[in-house]
Image (spheres, rainbow, N blue to C red):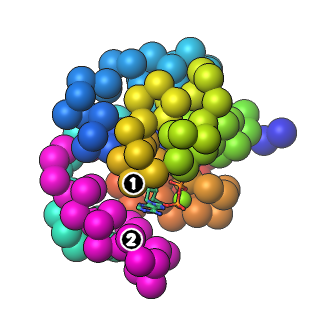
Amino acid sequence: MATERTLSIIKPDAVEQHHIGGIVSLIEGADLHILGMRMIHLTRPQAEGFYAVHKERPFFGELVQFMTRGPVVVMALEAEDAVARYRKLMGATNPADAVDGTIRKAFGGSIGENACHGSDSVENAKVEVGYFFPGYQTL
Ligand code: ADP
Ligand code: MG
């Protein structure tokens, strides 16, 4: 296993419901080291650019609307096997399918408003970390 970096976003639903602390606590409890963290309110172009891979999907408009409706917390995380480790900690996209102990089980409300984002591959993690933390893409 290699040391990796990955991008985490605490989404607007979780920020609104005061779950920043709860989510950060789970992240730190899983030994994912927080290298960088800040709160930002995404613009529409920023959200569209970040989710460009989903632009043909039927929920793209809804997703961009949701992600821009209030502030988010973006974090660059580092650990051994960070990408898979953080995906496991997040749980399934649909909180109804997420297992106990995961962020989405604890804090997700629906398949759309599911509390958090995490990069899904090492390659995408490099792009996504660089999107918000230029210079942090590589170890
Ligand atoms: P994940 O975040 O688990 O990697 P995807 O990459 O498939 O999931 O989708 C990106 C995000 O788009 C999801 O986290 C969720 O916020 C939203 N989304 C996914 N599927 C749906 C859907 N069927 N309806 C509404 N929003 C969705
Ligand atoms: Mg995804």
Question: Measuring 20% from the left and 57% from the top, which residue is drawn there?
Answer: 68
Instruction: Count every numbered label the image shows and give the total.
Output: 2
Q: Is residue 133 visible?
A: no
Q: Is residue 109 visible?
A: yes
Please give the residue where the numbered disc 1 appears in the rendered image: 112
Tag 1 secondary structure: loop
Name the foreground residue: 77 vs 54: 54
Q: Range of the magenta residues?
A: 50-75
Helix, strand, or loop for circle 2?
A: loop
Left or right of 135: which side holds 68? left
- Circles 2 and 1, Cβ within 8 Å, touching? The answer is yes
Confirm or reject: label 2 Cβ below 8 Å from ligand 1: yes
**Front position in the image: 46 or 88:** 88
Q: Residue at x 31, y 24 (%)?
A: 19
Type of amino acid at the residue the image marks with label 1: Gly
Q: Please tell me which of labels 2 and 1 falls first in the chain.
A: 2
Location of residue 85 in the rendering, given as x and y in whole percent from the top left corner: 68, 36
Give residue 64's quadrant in the image: bottom left
Determine if the C-beta at disc 1 is less than 8 A from ligand 1.
yes
Q: For this view, does 3 lie left or right of residue 94? A: right
Circle 2: residue type: Phe
Say whether residue 57 is magenta. yes
Q: Which mark is residue 9?
A: none
Q: Is residue 1 left or right of residue 9?
A: right
The residue singled out by tag 2 in the image is: 59
**Crowd band around label 2 with a 10 angstrom C-alpha radius: few (<14), some (14–19), many (20+):** few
Q: CA distance from mark 2 to mark 1?
A: 8 Å
In this view of the protein, which residue sits in the foreground, 76 or 106?
106
Above/below status of 95 relative to 121: above
Q: Quadrant of residue 42?
A: bottom left
